[in-house]
Amino acid sequence: MPRDHARNSLGFAKPPADTRVVVAMSGGVDSSVVAAMLAEEGYDVVGVTLQLYDHGAALAKKGACCAGRDIHDARRVAETMGFPHYVLDYENTFREAAIDEFAESYLAGATPVPCIRCNERVKFKDLLETAKDLDADCMATGHYIQRLDGAHGAELHTAGDPNRDQSYFLFSTTQEQLDFLRFPLGHLKSKEETRALATKYGLSVADKPDSQDICFVPNGDYASVIKKLRPDAAAPGEIVGIDGMVYGTHEGVIHYTIGQRRGLGIGGLADPLYVVKLDADLRQVIVGPKEMLATRKIPVREINWLGDTDFSAMGPQPMMVKVRSTHAPIDATLHPISATEAEVELAIAEKGVSPGQACVFYAPETTRILGGGWIWRGAPS
């Protein structure tokens, strides 16, 4: 009888050479290091890069992922480490799943987070299915998040480096997806460790800058992208107070965000006014006092629950939540309403909470991510 093999670094009871892993390669240093690391360990690595868009300005933009330059960089890494690499055209899928919704959400007065939708609907859905079609045992990415074995199966945990943790963008990862995914960089304590590994493997991307913007939004200019997709979004309208008083005019709601104070062109007031709501249908930018931005109760829907108990059967639960990717989790109480809806009650009111943002759940006093959902109503309470 063949002897049992100890589990390899990806958790399979067989040698690395018999373990096929598809690596999602963006062309950046993180995913490149993952692919090189697994190739050096002897795994049967297959690199896959998604062609997500082909906007002329973005193709020459170093800081954006999945553009022409990045595809070239991913291919070079594969050649250096000696594993096959494929480029898949996902432009139509990406436009439908991320870009179009981004524009529609923004015009509806929301603050969209297209990177989450891309992970949810493209990378961890269509690409993951492609990996299975390639007879892969798992799919690995360069995300900074940890997958740990728990009492009830695979669990999602925050990264070893809190400054690079990407849990906010991955809350919608389902349990089935989590079982198939691997995050080999999640335990690292700094980006310097990743770059040191890239240098060790002789990768040309070792000093490549990190991506800062949404990949299809060159230079962070949301308005110009939305104007191309929805030309009518730049239509002028009125800046009005919550009492209906007209304070001035604007050149399109696409130029404003919830919580904005500067650039309104409203002067001579005793107390400053802030954007508290956007109404694209009426072409109105609605302004009000700062206290109107403070919110304690947040309606959340499309919830993805990664806890061990039945979500809809739970009573109120103490929870840590994050409503912005750059903010630390804060104390809250989670009130489930159905299997996919809840109200989150913050211990302390938070300013600038907007529909379209994600609300991510964390188990108190642990590193575990319990899922999250989408904020869907903007009325402060």
Image (cartoon, rainbow, N blue to C red):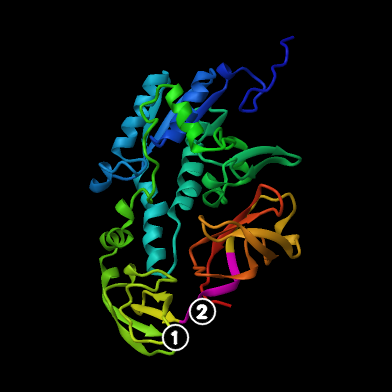
Give amino acid for label 1.
Answer: Ile
On the rendered structure, is 340 left or right of 274?
Answer: right
Q: Which mark is residue 183?
A: none
Q: Is residue 24 visible?
A: no
In this view, 317 is above or below 117: below
- Quadrant the N terminus occupies: top right
Residue 294 is a magenta residue: yes
Instruction: Check disc 2 and report the residue beneath it.
Output: 292
What residue is drawn where x is 71% and y is 52%? 365
Indicate which disc residue 242 carries.
Answer: 1
- Find out whether the residues at labels 1 and 2 contact each other: C-beta distance under 8 Å: yes
Vertical comparison of 38 with 343: above or below: above
Identified at 53% across, 17% down, the residue is 42
Indicate the position of residue 354 as horizontal and vertical percent values. Answer: 49, 68
Crowd rating for badge 1 (residues with CA inside 10 Å; few <14, some 14–19, many 20+): few
Residue ID at (67%, 64%): 332
Q: CA distance from mark 1 to mark 2?
A: 10 Å
Q: Amino acid at mark 2?
A: Met
Span highlighted in magenta in the image: 289-300
